[in-house]
Image (tube, rainbow, N blue to C red):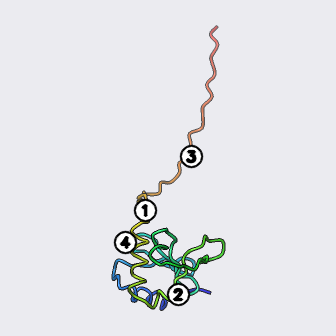
Amino acid sequence: MASSIETVHYISDQAGLGSRLTFKRMFGEFGLYLDGKVVAFVCDDRLYLKPTPEGRAFLGQVTLAPPYPVAKDHYLLDDEVDDPERLRGALEVTARVLPEPRPKKPRGKVRAKTPKASKVRRTKRSSK
């Protein structure tokens, strides 16, 4: 079941992070970005925070669950979504310890492939 945009807007509003918190649609679900770092996913209208030791220390007891099949476990945030201070803190602590995203390589112009010049076979001329 795909997540609704209303759920993502609700989580964003609750976090109170303004333009620092953005989202991107991913295969019917959503990735949440804080300061350009992927910190959480919204899948099946539930919030899954990337697992970090600092996030666990901040949250205390956590529920682990995969956001989608074959994914690693993340911290499933249920009650935190309705607690703006706790939600904001969990997102900020996680973003603080995650590495900076790798810079994207600039896309260059696509050049048309030219056929390689065929190799010319040279033969030795015999002298008479």
Q: Residues within 10 Å of mark 1 (few under 14, many from 20)?
A: few
Answer above or below: position of 1 versus 101: below
Q: Is residue 19 left or right of residue 108?
A: left
Q: Position of residue 66 (x, y in %)?
A: 61, 76
Residue that mark 3 sits on = 115
Give the amino acid at mark 3: Pro
Q: Please report the residue visible at 62 percent of the width from the left and 77 percent of the height from the top.
A: 68
Q: Name the amino acid type tagged 1.
A: Pro
Task: Name the N-terminal-most of marks 4 and 2.
Answer: 4
> Any mark on residue 35, and which?
4
Query: What is the C-alpha distance between the residues marked 3 and 2?
Result: 59 Å
Mark 4: amino acid: Asp
The residue depicted at 41 percent of the width and 70 percent of the height is: 95
- Front-most of 117 and 76? 76
Quarter location, residue 90: bottom left
**Residue 28 % position (x, y):** 57, 81
- SS of the residue at dot 4? loop
